[in-house]
Image (cartoon, helix red, strand yellow):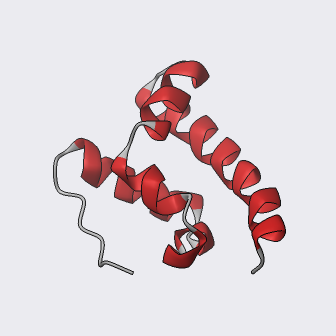
Amino acid sequence: MDKNQFGAILPIIVADFVARAAERYLWTENEAFLKIYASELYKYLESEETKLWQYSTDKLLSLFDDELNGRLTLLPY
């Protein structure tokens, strides 16, 4: 995927991820946005090379749960 395509799809993925995280953790969307953007998971998600953007929102939330519980494990890309 080229940089322009990735730049167009990432905000859509993140918007759904933020909305679902806010719902799950009973955070405001702003709180969810700040916590996700500060996460290690987001650093991987914003890199097209990791292919995390292909994961479902449910899978991203599961990985985010892991990070919040101190056990996020991702293979290096």
The N terminus - image quarter: bottom right
Residue at position x 40%, y 54% in the image: 41
Percent coordinates x, y for residue 31 in the rendering: 49, 21
The C terminus - image quarter: bottom left
Judging depth in this view, the residue of 34 and 18 nearest the camera is 34
Taking the image as shown, residue 55 lies to the left or right of residue 61, namely right
Judging depth in this view, the residue of 4 and 9 nearest the camera is 4
Which residue reaches farthest front? 3
Residue at position x 52%, y 70% in the image: 52
Percent coordinates x, y for residue 62 in the rendering: 38, 57
Taking the image as shown, residue 57 lies to the left or right of residue 10, namely left
Which residue reaches farthest left? 70
Taking the image as shown, residue 29 lies to the left or right of residue 35, namely right
Taking the image as shown, residue 67 lies to the left or right of residue 64, namely left
Q: Quadrant of residue 38?
A: top left
Instruction: State the count of labels.
Output: 0
Residue at position x 27%, y 50% in the image: 67
Percent coordinates x, y for residue 42 in the rendering: 47, 51
Relative to 1, say whether 58 is above or below. above
Relative to 49, say whether 16 is above or below. above
